């Protein structure tokens, strides 16, 4: 991650980028575009699935959600450039948690080389955008280059756009994959979720309408399934902070310069806060407030994840299409929690197309 990544900077520059990204990610036009793209890429992917060999849900969701996010960030459509970017990006994140040895042939070296190539590609895109001077921003790059504060250099924009791709390859597909993992082990939740989504699908077909982003987010049980998956799955296990001065918290002093890991798992799986915390129970959210202190999958405060609505929307769309089109049997697999959350075997499942619709 570069020095000017939003995750590493603080003060007015962090607030500026956070604000710009937050309002763009919340905009109705982006949500409509994400809905359209998710639908398109999902149909393209699922059309290739066969009943004769397993589908690896983690790979499929990574592919779909990366394409959707890259389109939202830099306006790139699937094709040769996207494939090239995906290849470089995978090399880049492979080095994010590697031995700090930057010698030719090492993982870190390959990762940094890949990042350089990506920065070059994004610089080219930024230059094309600057010369065409967009009036209405269509993607995050447009939003950042039309900022008039003069704080945002092309290097800073390119670096942040690349870092913003990480949730498309990691957090969002992991969330989607975990919903399928937990639903596979909880038939009653799967049945309620499927009925809710089939009902909406039938209604929309009867009215001759396509589903809008707000339709997907209006499904109450589907939202509780996502919330419960965020609680149990802890896609981001916690956040790090460094004390810039001595801080007193509940009688403990955190000295200046010390680092603190706020470990979400210990809160989300605390049996004083959640009954049977290791049990997947979406119904617990039907009459429970999402108290910000006890439930922080997207962090909080001035660094609250600006992509939280998008993550929920993409996962709702994925679930809708998946459960209304397929039945499935999941193979054995286990969740790995360190250094990042993922499935050990990439979540293989055997699908059957539904014929009851
Ligand atoms: C399941 C999906 C996601 C989860 C669980 C998640 C979680 C988080 C968490 C916990 C933080 C706080 C980090 C900290 O305080 O140090 C964060 C920050 C951030 N997230 Fe997400 N995120 C997700 C998806 C997304 C998406 C789709 C985007 C948009 C591209 C996004 C963009 C960001 C950005 C830019 C920040 C940094 C905010 C700042 O430091 O000002 N995230 N996310």
Image (cartoon, rainbow, N blue to C red):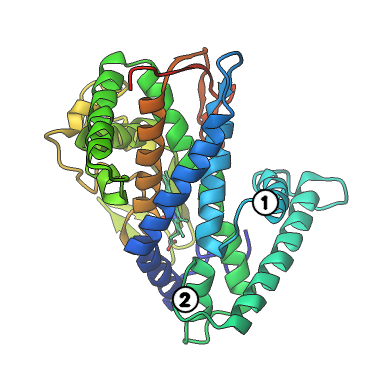
Q: Quadrant of the C terminus?
A: top left
Q: Tell me if 201 is positioned left or right of 17 in this view.
A: left
- In this rendering, the count of numbered labels is 2
Q: Position of residue 104 (x, y in %)?
A: 88, 51
Q: Which residue is mark 2?
A: 13
Gap in angstroms between the C-alphas marked 2 and 1: 34 Å
Q: Secondary structure at mark 2?
A: helix
In this rendering, the label closer to the viewer, 2 or 1? 1
In the image, is residue 179 above or below residue 97? Answer: above
Q: Quadrant of the N terminus?
A: bottom right
In the image, is residue 50 above or below residue 88? Answer: above
Q: Position of residue 258 (x, y in %)?
A: 48, 56
Q: Quadrant of residue 24?
A: bottom left
User: Which of 349/119 is in front?
Assistant: 349
Q: Tell me if 29 is positioned left or right of 339 in this view.
A: left
Q: Ligand 1 near label 1 (Cβ, under 8 Å)?
A: no
User: Which of 9/226 is in front?
Assistant: 226
Q: Which residue is mark 1?
A: 79
Q: Residue at x 28, y 34 (%)?
A: 201
């Amino acid at each position: 991650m570069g020095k000017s990544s939003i995750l590493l900077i603080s003060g007015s520059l962090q607030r500026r980028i956070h604000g710009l990204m937050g309002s763009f990610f919340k905009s109705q036009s982006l949500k409509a575009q994400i809905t359209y793209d998710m639908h398109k890429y999902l149909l393209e992917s699922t059309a290739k699935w066969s009943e004769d060999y397993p589908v690896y849900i983690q790979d499929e969701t990574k592919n779909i959600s990366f394409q959707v996010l890259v389109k939202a960030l830099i306006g790139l459509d699937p094709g040769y450039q996207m494939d090239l970017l995906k290849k470089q990006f995978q090399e880049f994140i492979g080095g994010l948690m590697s031995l700090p040895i930057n010698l030719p042939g090492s993982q870190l070296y390959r990762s940094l080389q890949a990042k350089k190539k990506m920065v070059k590609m994004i610089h080219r895109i930024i230059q094309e955008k600057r010369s065409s001077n967009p009036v209405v921003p269509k993607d995050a790059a447009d939003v950042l280059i039309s900022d008039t504060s003069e704080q945002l250099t092309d290097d800073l924009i390119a670096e942040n756009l690349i870092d913003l791709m990480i949730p498309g390859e990691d957090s969002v597909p992991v969330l989607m994959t975990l919903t399928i993992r937990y639903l596979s082990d909880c038939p009653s939740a799967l049945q309620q979720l499927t009925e809710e989504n089939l009902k909406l699908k039938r209604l929309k077909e009867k009215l001759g309408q396509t589903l809008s982003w707000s339709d997907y987010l209006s499904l109450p049980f589907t939202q509780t399934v996502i919330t419960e998956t965020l609680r149990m799955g802890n896609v981001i296990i916690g956040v790090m902070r460094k004390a810039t001065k001595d801080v007193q918290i509940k009688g403990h002093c955190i000295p200046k310069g010390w680092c603190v890991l706020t470990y979400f798992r210990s809160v989300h799986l605390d049996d004083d806060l959640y009954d049977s915390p290791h049990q997947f129970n979406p119904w617990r959210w039907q009459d429970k407030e999402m108290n910000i202190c006890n439930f922080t999958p997207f962090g909080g405060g001035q660094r609250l994840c600006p992509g939280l609505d998008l993550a929920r929307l993409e996962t709702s769309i994925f679930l809708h299409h998946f459960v209304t089109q397929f039945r499935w049997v999941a193979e054995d697999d286990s969740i790995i929690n360190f250094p990042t959350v993922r499935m050990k075997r990439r979540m293989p499942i055997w699908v059957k197309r539904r014929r009851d619709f």
